[in-house]
Amino acid sequence: MSLASHTRRPAAPPAAELTGAMFIGSRRVTGAGAVAHSHDARTGQLLEPAYAGGTPEDVAAACQAAEDAFDTYRNLHPWHRARFLETVADNLTALTDALVARAHQETGLPTARLTGEIARTAGQLRMFAAVLTEGSWLDARIDPAQPGRTPQPRPDIRQQHIPLGPVAVFGASNFPLAFSVLGGDTASALAAGCPVVVKAHDAHLGTSEFAAHAVRAAVVTHKLPDGVFSLLVGDGPTLGTQLVTDPRIQAVAFTGSRAVGLALAHTAASRPQPVPVYAEMSSINPVVLMPGALAERATSLAEEFVASLTLGAGQFCTNPGLLLAVDGPDLQTFLQTASRAVAADAGATMLTPRIAKSYRVETETVASHPSVQVLARGAQPDSAGPGQAVLMTARAADVIADPDLQREMFGAAALVVRCDDPAQLAETLRRLEGQLTATLHTALTDTEDARALLPLLERKAGRVLANGWPTGVEVGHAMVHGGPYPATTDARTTSVGSRAIERFLRPVAYQDLPQELLPVALRDDNPYNIPRRVDGEASPRPGS
Amino acid sequence: MSLASHTRRPAAPPAAELTGAMFIGSRRVTGAGAVAHSHDARTGQLLEPAYAGGTPEDVAAACQAAEDAFDTYRNLHPWHRARFLETVADNLTALTDALVARAHQETGLPTARLTGEIARTAGQLRMFAAVLTEGSWLDARIDPAQPGRTPQPRPDIRQQHIPLGPVAVFGASNFPLAFSVLGGDTASALAAGCPVVVKAHDAHLGTSEFAAHAVRAAVVTHKLPDGVFSLLVGDGPTLGTQLVTDPRIQAVAFTGSRAVGLALAHTAASRPQPVPVYAEMSSINPVVLMPGALAERATSLAEEFVASLTLGAGQFCTNPGLLLAVDGPDLQTFLQTASRAVAADAGATMLTPRIAKSYRVETETVASHPSVQVLARGAQPDSAGPGQAVLMTARAADVIADPDLQREMFGAAALVVRCDDPAQLAETLRRLEGQLTATLHTALTDTEDARALLPLLERKAGRVLANGWPTGVEVGHAMVHGGPYPATTDARTTSVGSRAIERFLRPVAYQDLPQELLPVALRDDNPYNIPRRVDGEASPRPGS
């Protein structure tokens, strides 16, 4: 696909000053609602500037701007949107120093991790630019007319994807860049042709404002309609609910807790016109240690496990929170090594004092369960929101008996489930709720038993891993970051990887439209030069 | 793709006697619930045999049989399922005489239409067999490992679609074959690898039992697990609710009224584990008559319109129930011709006396609206469920003012909306709810104005037509029979055409699985010989 007609424009340098104002399209608006501040995650100290929450009028204005932008934005040449996303990535990269410094303050996450997260976020935007350029995302199809068919002639029917409309995005606290203002939800919605209204996460307001600068500057550079992107500030129960119930919003994307995800889903389903909610919620990511694997490498498995468990203070949706194994000497070796490693863990500052408190409550609820034994605790760091690693164990019969032992402890806590035999292990898996991931550690001798477990793991999770750890989610074309309820509200989708764009699209068929009325992507001469299916068969692109 | 290894087995002759028993897998079970009968649609006379409704235990048994069958059935070679679907089509075709005779009695639909519907239903099953054989439905993807990538190596990640699990199907009354026991929902769910539990529509119980024979015989022929298909009898509020709330059911497909569709969606969303509901509900299918088209051919448009309106007593989801045009002499010509044609219409027996009564209530509600003028009524046929064509008109300002004038009148009734100017016509369209279809009639002189309306029509409907009529839904690869709420509960899907299979699938990623544990479709040597995407790029099949 030739890009000759689309030269790269120089990026306008995004402003790097925080003001505390929202973006309603290009308008900087200081809210008239409750004032919020971010806080230094380690010291608890209040950070400037103040962010005043948006009013119902601000929400309506942002949604109307998005609606006004929609038809123009969605009908741009897809390459135009691709160049826009690349400029957003460039702008984001240009802001690295300011973003890392602020995000480090606001989240307590290490600067190296945050620098990597910016690269991931920019890479994600560029991946969607490549997706737009390649063209399969439109899923263009042509079933040509058959005028001579009997008993009735067949009309000409063509199909493409069109975007749903304005999208509301609620970012996650644990990835202030990759799952926030410019994260995968925003990138995939913008790629699809949907204007986006983001509600900033109140734990990283400054990081959010910087990220919004990056996209707003790109909107100007590419002369896009003003309402393509807005950033609102406010609390979830009021402003968030107003946003989700606004009739102009046509889909909602969210990453966070189960309680909030379900509340959003309920709100969206109760609208006069219900809209889809893509909520990525809770997962405890079961890991099965097969007997051969334990016999072969119990010690190294334990070390790898604790490294995965404590990474980022355990604040990953894919954190390995539940291990399952048949009890015996090899599992005991594993537990001893893992206990030593957890006890040696220094702990880390959690994203917010509230998350740290919730983590303590969840772990203490599980730890005080009569069937649970605490094996080890790490150190408690000196911090406003200290995160202390905890390793616990319970017998499978007790886990089967009490579903409450499946509760997510968002942080570096795990429960090791000791099973009497492989059948009980399988039964424990069968009782689990839906998950983002499920992992098997195997040796060659485990192959047959592992194969028997796979149908069960497939049904429970969006991603099945062998001999690895679930933390770390590749951004690619084959990734699924999703899974059966309650891991997400829609198991048919992914929030990471190129097919995340599908969440914001729907197919439309066009019957017997004359060439001059057909969408560009479906015209006979294939002006976008994209792959199309003719009578269900892939058709080579003219240019290839 | 060579089929040499899969020889066609001779179809077992399906039994052609009605017994009044349900199928719980292969078991013939006579219910212990309330007894129901079908009725002759024209005479109202009760038809034998009696069908006794299933108990909660029967529902649970059918769902358990489906669950027990699931893993075996979904892991069959897709060609095996393809041959099964072809045998179902053969069996259905072999039953044509018995099916047409019974369906004609039960529905009042003409025998020629029913014969055509059997061909359509069999064709639909064969289309899904071809889809399974071609292989794109699996959407297999491979992102190969990059062991040398820095800072971290990239794992090997592969993806395929897997089926959701057992599916509950609720057939429609108006297509006793193509949207019922063996209709598009069942065909696409079985193709996807999902066992199906059908609740028979109580308006065509005998037709349903015959159709179930066709699939049960094919289950035996192909030695499939017993619970792949069950047929239950019972009423919607009790047995239907039990079916939708059964924890083994993982998706629901429905075609029918908005009230029932919304009730099912609410029930499914209230489960401990919510599941998707694909309900195809109500649509009034707006048709815009552009000024140039009216000037050029008002008379022929009127004749075509009334033919489409009265086809099948107007009992199509895609019936043209709302026409829009700018008022003037050409529209008056159209209305005069259409009125004459409606007045000359003989009427027809509707599917059931209940549907006929509901149609009378709906049309009288609209006809008695102070803003509505009745232009013509057809004859009232002598029948237990008489359907009388009705043509009405109202001013656009009144339709805009009262959303209740958008109500669906399921039958041969239409409202012609007279607009003052093109802007008011566009505003009326903007106020419409979501639709299955939206149609434009244009002349060359209308091109610019029609193009301006297209973004609006796309947003309102799943299918946009030019210069045709929406009744008649092609079964192909580009068809969308779906649309924004309340046309359906999920605008991202279609219930007709090859992509209907997508409703019952979800993606799963496999990370670093050794070859011997990978799903067959994803192994290096591509044993199914299907198209796969490697790093997002289409990869040629080895055999092509």
Image (cartoon, coloured by chain):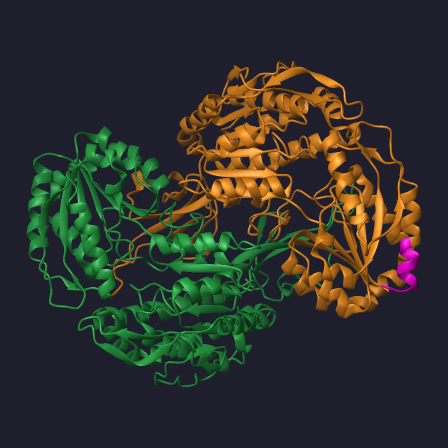
Chain colours: A green, B orange
Quadrant of image for the C terminus of chain A: bottom right
User: Over which residues does the magenta segment extend?
Assistant: B327-335
Does residue B31 sit above or below B421 in this rendering?
above
Say whether residue B331 is magenta: yes
In the displayed structure, B56 sits above or below B3; it is above
Q: Is residue A182 above or below residue B154?
A: below
Q: Is residue B517 left or right of residue B17?
A: left
State the residue at coordinates (27%, 63%): B149
Residue visible at 80% across and 45% down in the picture: B413
Q: Depth check: B140 or A184 in front?
A: A184
Foreground residue, B232 or A457?
A: B232
Residue A153, by quadrant, is top right
Where's residue B238, x and y in %?
A: 53, 29
Image location (x, y in percent) of residue A54: 44, 74
**Left or right position of A394 against B9:** left
Where does residue B159 sit, x and y in percent of width and height?
39, 48
- Residue B315 percent across, percent down from the top left: 74, 39
For residue B386, side relative to residue A279 (left or right): right
Mainly helix, strand or loop, the magenta region?
helix
**Residue B9 visible:** no
Q: Residue A454: say if magenta.
A: no
Front-lying residue, A39 or A136: A39
Of residues A200 and A78, the one drawn nearer to the viewer in this rendering: A200
Give the number of marks.
Answer: 0
- With respect to residue A446, does B224 lie above or below? above
Q: Is residue B41 visible?
A: yes
Q: What residue is at 50 percent from the left and 44 percent from the top?
A: B137
Q: Is residue A402 left or right of residue A544?
A: left
